[in-house]
Amino acid sequence: MEIKVPFYNIINIFLPGLVLLGAVVLLFLDKVKVLVQEITDIGSAGLEVLVTVSLFAIAYEAGYIIFRIGSIVIEPILKKLFVWTEYSDFIAAKKSSDKAHDKLETLSREYAYSRTHITLFLILIILSGVRSLWWIAFLCVLILALFIVTVRGHMKRIQKIVKQYNPLS
């Protein structure tokens, strides 16, 4: 059986899921230790493999949920905060030349990556607040601000390229 996972899915879905799971382990270490001890007490051979595969599946699903929340909740907010290019203009510019197509593909992927990380760090701010770990929450706020500035930059560059290459604008 050959499994092919696109690189985009690894970066934009799986990696944020792994980061979230890792952060949850660190934020809730006391509870995770108890869970790990309970799993260890079962003592079944091969259980480690089952748990590892399960964690990878959970990480992918968590990342996919983060990605979808970013698309459904965060993107409309970003569209209200920053100037947005109409999708039809984006597609027209993309079709106008290979150079525009390549630039817009790259910026679109980087935008989606940043949008997913905005969602991830919002979740981490909430989880840090639940545990009253304010220094971690503050660090996540700083990282969140970095990704918001990044999204703004991507949106400006996309808009500039669309204006340059779209024959209708």
Image (spheres, rainbow, N blue to C red):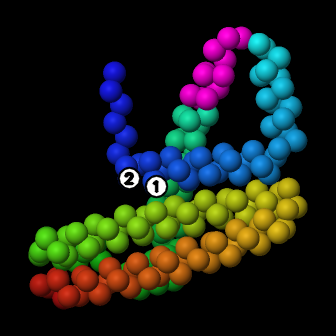
Quadrant assignment, res 58: top right
Q: Is residue 96 left or right of residue 44?
A: left
Report x, y in % for residue 105.
28, 66
In this orientation, does residue 88 appear? no
Query: Which class describes the residues within 10 Å of circle 1: few (<14), some (14-19), or many (20+)?
Result: many
Magenta extent: 44-54
Farthest residue toward the top?
Answer: 44
Report x, y in % for residue 49.
60, 22
Q: Is residue 126 above or below residue 100?
A: above
Q: Kindly identify the amino acid type of the residue bearing the numbered disc 2.
A: Tyr
The C terminus: image quadrant: bottom left
Asked if residue 145 lies in the magenta stretch, the reply is: no
Residue drawn at the location 48% of the way across and 50% of the way down = 13
Of 91 and 4, nearer the camera is 4
* SS majority, magenta: helix
Query: Which class describes the residues within 10 Å of circle 2: few (<14), some (14-19), or many (20+)?
Result: few
Report x, y in % for residue 151.
47, 76
Q: Which residue is mark 1?
A: 12
Res 8 label: 2
Report x, y in % for residue 48.
66, 22
Q: Secondary structure at mark 1?
A: helix
Res 115 label: none
Q: Is residue 124 left or right of residue 76?
A: right
Residue drawn at the location 12% of the way across and 84% of the way down = 167
